[in-house]
Amino acid sequence: MGLKQNLHNFRQKNKDKKWLPAFSAIHTFLFLPNETTHNGTHIKAADDLKRTMNTVIMAMVPCLIFGMFNAGYQHHLAFGEITQATGGFFSAEFWTLDNFSVGFWKVIPLVIVSYVVGLAIEILFAIKNSHEVEEGYLVTGMLVPLIIPIDTPLWMLAVAVAFGVVIGKEVFGGTGMNILNPALTIRAFLFFAYPTWMSGDKVWVHGAVEQDQLIAAGKNVDAISGETILGSLAQNKGANYDIMDMFFGLIPGSVGETSTLLILLGGLFLIFAKIGSWRIMLSSVIGALVMGLIFNGVVAQEWITESSKFYGLMSTTFWQHLLIGGFAFGTVFMATDPVTAAQTNKGKWIYGFLVGFISIMIRVFNPAYPEGVMLAILLMNVFAPTIDHYVVQGNVKKRMKRVKAKVA
Amino acid sequence: MGKDSRLILDPLADNNPITIQVLGICSALAITAELEASIVMSISVLFVLGIGNVVISLMRNIIPSKIRIIVQLIVVATLVIIVDLVLKAFAYELSKTLSVFVGLIITNCIIMGRFEAFALGNGPWRSFLDGIGNALGYGVILIIVGFFRELLGSGTLLGFPVLGDPIEKTGLYAIGYENNGFMLLSPMALIVVGIIIWIQRTRNKALIED
């Protein structure tokens, strides 16, 4: 009798214990349970919820690894310990063990806290409602560390995860019933509750906040600024990085969202695995480009001048909006969330287009916060069922007409 | 007496105007960022609803039913103006915090609802108890919400810093705690009220509607 059989027997023996859902969650994560049928004809589909989730996580792993290297790189760069990697993404100066270890020890605690708190709450609710633990948190738990600043205090993250999982998901009935994307709910909570840790020019580089506190305490050290591109543009200071750095991701920002290249690869992988919706990704990019073009048009018509506070972001070349901020990450990994996005194909086009369109609009016009992807996706999450409703009703009407035409 | 005491106790829990009837939400969201404002608001509503119910009940047999809403409005408006002037005279700073929401007690659905549903058909004593009960039920929720929002949002209670000083970094702030700015925004009041409703209905399944 192997381990597998032992675990199965253990499960059978404790069939009516209250904590069984907690055990089976981990059990089925490792092994296929023995309860599958052995005869008869069945349709076999490999992509159950757990496989789907694992595929998405695989698509995010490159972003996570890169995020660790980049966190260390930005840290060392800001503190003047290394010079700019001249070869950019492909140079060995970037992929050093030193960069990695700094990032690794900052990012791994974020991942652990996110998973431990989130899964603990999921298991708690599963036991309380005596249903099986659903795998919904696997992706959320990985998304969360990727979309927050590197220096976010762990207790804040824990509070936010608890809030996001309970209020964003469990009150609606758990995985698959939520209206809002839980990862974005967590980020929105952090952003509104602790704005000083989520925006500004200090939080994006590890150590900058600490340095600031030392200065406030009267120590004689240099202030570190890790302005993001959006932050810089919003203050009309122009983009502070070149296009190649933007595309490859050697810029300050949330942990995993800087590298457009790796997000693109992840997105292609999701489309290839038929898990992410290419309709949403494509239409969202179109929406962003359209809004960008409108703003460029406004600048070209000279309706606003350089003295306007919107000039910096409005005059950004339209396609560059795709490379900066969290747009790429939001579009590929958040807007495509199958639970909260629109379900109908036509609905997906409308939903995606509006996500992109509104993202850039909020990005330009929101004075407090030079990024709009989070708010745009949350807003469209709320409207997704409405969009679907009208798409379905439109289809019903069309078919009713066809019936009438035949009868007549 | 048993029946009369239910008039006070029912609205406190199983027939709470905010969590069960979902009335008076607007002011519950607007003024609960501070505990003091919540308490003053509760007392104001207690005064208006207690007296108002008695007045309406005394006049119930002489009010022509066609114009009863107008009569009710005049009664509640008079009482609200008294509250407003008293606040302005004796607690000016607080009346500025409450601003328009004292005046808006007039439109608080709880008050017109009790006039219509209870005072028009019951004697003055029972109407008085009903008014006090409903106002207390409203006040309890306001004070619970105000307590959590002020404690977590500003780290104070009634203006007294209970968690330490955020600027001097004493108390909890010394170990890295920070105030939750989200608590001061209205959406969080809605969420706190929602959590109270959730807890209440989990404890008493009879309250869950389909």
Image: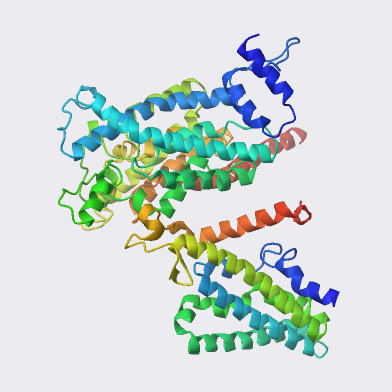
Q: In the picture provided, is A57 more to the left or to the right than A385?
A: left
Q: In the picture provided, is A148 more to the left or to the right than A240?
A: right
Q: Residue furthest right?
A: B2
Identify the image quadrant of residue B59.
Answer: bottom right
- The residue shown at (39%, 50%) is A362
Q: In the picture provided, is A330 more to the left or to the right than B35?
A: left
Identify the image quadrant of residue A165.
Answer: top right
In the image, B71 versus A192, the foreground residue is: A192
The picture places residue A52, in percent across and down from the top left corner, at 54, 25
Q: What is the tally of numbered marks visible in this picture?
A: 0
- The residue shown at (47%, 27%) is A57
Q: Is residue A48 visible?
A: no
In the image, A346 versus A28, the foreground residue is: A28
Q: How is the image coloured?
A: rainbow
In the image, A349 versus A385, the foreground residue is: A385
Quadrant containing the N terminus of chain A is top right
Q: Is residue B175 visible?
A: yes
The picture places residue A358, in percent across and down from the top left corner, at 42, 47
The picture places residue B5, in percent across and down from the top left corner, at 80, 75
Quadrant containing the C terminus of chain A is top right
- The residue shown at (50%, 28%) is A276
